[in-house]
Amino acid sequence: MIREKTVSLVIPVLNEEQGLEKMLPHLPSGIDEVIIVDGGSKDKTVEVAQKYGATVLVQKTKGYGAAYFEGFAAAKGEIIATVDGDATYPLNSIPHMVEWLVDRKYIFVSGSRFPLSNMMSMHQRNFIGNMVVTTLTSFLFRTKVVDVNSGMWVFYKSFLEKPKFISDAWNLSLEIKIEAICQKGGVFIEYPINYFERLGESKVVRPWRTGFKSLFFLAAKKWQVMGRSRRVEI
């Protein structure tokens, strides 16, 4: 427990034995359970996860967002933390993010990787794409966002009861932050984190195509949010 709150760490994976082997032996204290959602790994990902006592779920529906939804449903903690399975995110920041969440009365804390402490940790095209999508998100939803594509989040599980998600793919990373931003009461904040070079192969086969999909998704999400606002006003 951290700040007297139970914490579940959810990690979606696909062939991430290297990352998990580096990450799981160094979990910070206070994390009550680790849930690994495996999307059909062909390497020793599952064996490594089980060796370190993690709960392994076999992903039923394809997609990055779908993996998270399955992990969220299984999580028993009051607070959920997320990271990718490639060892790019700092697990030792989780307790600090939970403290921000609880002490400052937020509902959603997102890890911000920028400015990068090591420019070699992120490919240039990913850096540029992230800046474009982040800038557009800030403009469309009238909130200053530094890193909208971060995969490290800490939030109350109860937060998931309100949003109406439309993505079960990569764009869940955008959408979950947008939903937090759009809730009333100042529930969203970013926390500065380090970011490391990934272990293993990237799962994004066509990064530019993924980036364009993100831009179209932002337009669709803005339309959905505007529709909700109109219904509330009526």
Image (cartoon, rainbow, N blue to C red):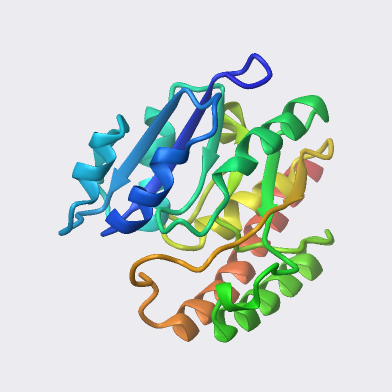
Residue at the farthest left position: 42
Residue drawn at 17 percent across, 58 percent down: 43
Residue drawn at 84 percent across, 35 percent down: 185
* Vertical comparison of 204 with 60: above or below: below
Tell me if 104 is positioned left or right of 134 in this view: right
Q: Quadrant of the C terminus?
A: top right
Percent x, y of residue 184: 81, 39
* Vertical comparison of 104 with 210: above or below: above
Tell me if 56 is positioned left or right of 120 in this view: left
* Vertical comparison of 2 with 109: above or below: above
Q: Is residue 202 visible?
A: yes
Residue drawn at 32 percent across, 58 percent down: 18
Q: Quadrant of residue 219?
A: bottom right
Q: Is residue 234 visible?
A: no
Q: Nearer the viewer, residue 87 or 104?
A: 87
Residue at the farthest top position: 4
Q: Quadrant of residue 74?
A: top left
Percent x, y of residue 197: 50, 68
Residue drawn at 38 percent across, 37 percent down: 71
Q: Nearer the viewer, residue 184 or 50?
A: 50
Tell me if 191 is positioned left or right of 208 in this view: right
Q: Quadrant of residue 183?
A: top right
Percent x, y of residue 146: 76, 63
Q: Quadrant of the N terminus?
A: top right
How many labels were placed on the picture? Answer: 0
